[in-house]
Image: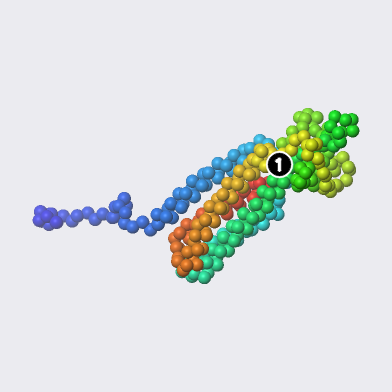
Amino acid sequence: MSESALQDNYVPEQHAPDPMISHGDPTAPGKVGIWLFLASEIMFFVAILGSYVILRGGSHDLFAEHAKALNKWAAGTNTLVLIFSSLTMALAVDAAQKRQQRRMVKCLALTLACAFGFMGIKAYEYHAKWVHETVVAHEGDAGSASSTVYVYDGHVHHAPNGDLLLTGYRAPLEQFADAKIGFDIHLVSEHGLETFVEAQAGHPVKEQEYTIKASNVGTQIQYGPWKNIFYACYFTLTGVHGIHVLGGMIPLTILLVQGLRGKFFPAHTEYVGLYWHFVDLVWIFLFPLLYLI
């Protein structure tokens, strides 16, 4: 302080620390990074989920009709699996922070097992769609008066000679085709064909087994994303989510291996946990949108 200031009884003004100058950020850069990444993921999923809602609103009957072919029990089981995995992931984070190796390894292993279980159930669902087909074929000699064209829908197994072994339902194409819009194989659903057959019979009917000669098949289409707009949305949403589950399984495996070696990464385990909770939360939205509504 200068001599003149002392003579004039001048006291310098006291200032609080400048907030623009870093004095030690309590938030780790890694946590900021994972939250920014999750923010971008939220925007991404909001976009595709919003697109699904808009498309469903424009074709409500089509979406509702084909959603009946989805396996609600398998999806419900997957929901429980992911909810349980969120619990084990949270316990793994807590164990890593407390440096409890045995508990951490056990919880990480359970979380990874749940991830494999989820993907296994999803593979089962995908396979059920892969072997589910709508087939248009004639029975008898083509062009003859006794030949009838049928539309089939059900699960297909291919015989060694190329014939189709189909378990499902069938109806004469001429009767099943809508008089107003005609026939579109992309719009045929298992439930719709079953309902039609039951209405014709006047009583509930069970699935039948049919052998369709390969030479008699006119057109056929699997229940894949090319079936119609509903399945395009279904495979896009569940496929993208499945890729995110696979993405989470990689760091989970790395943390598990390091945990078995006696190494702890509390911060990294927490970051993986945040990502895993986000993946689980996305499925909580997908399950009712695709399977229940």
Q: Classify residue 236 as left or right of residue 25.
A: right
Position of residue 235 measured from the top left corner of the image (x, y, whole percent): 63, 44
Position of residue 114 measured from the top left corner of the image (x, y, whole percent): 60, 60
SS type, badge 1: strand
Q: Quadrant of residue 171?
A: top right
Q: Residues within 10 Å of mark 1 (few under 14, many from 20)?
A: some
Give me the residue at 66% from left, 46% from top: 290
Give me the residue at 62% from left, 41% from top: 52
Q: Tell me the amino acid under the disc marked 1.
A: Gln
Residue at label 1? 222
Give me the residue at 59% from left, 43% from top: 49
Q: Quadrant of residue 202?
A: top right
Q: Classify residue 134 as left or right of residue 49.
A: right
Q: Is residue 40 above or below residue 183?
A: below
Let me know if residue 75 appears in the view: no
Q: Classify residue 172 as left or right of residue 281.
A: right
Q: Is residue 110 above or below residue 200?
A: below
Quadrant (top left, top right, bottom left, bottom right) of the N terminus:
bottom left
Q: Nearer the viewer, residue 262 or 165?
A: 165
Total marks drawn? Answer: 1
Let me know if residue 17 appears in the view: yes
Position of residue 212 measured from the top left corner of the image (x, y, whole percent): 81, 41
Q: Classify residue 99 as left or right of residue 146.
A: left
Position of residue 46 measured from the top left corner of the image (x, y, whole percent): 55, 44
Give me the residue at 57% from left, 61% from top: 111
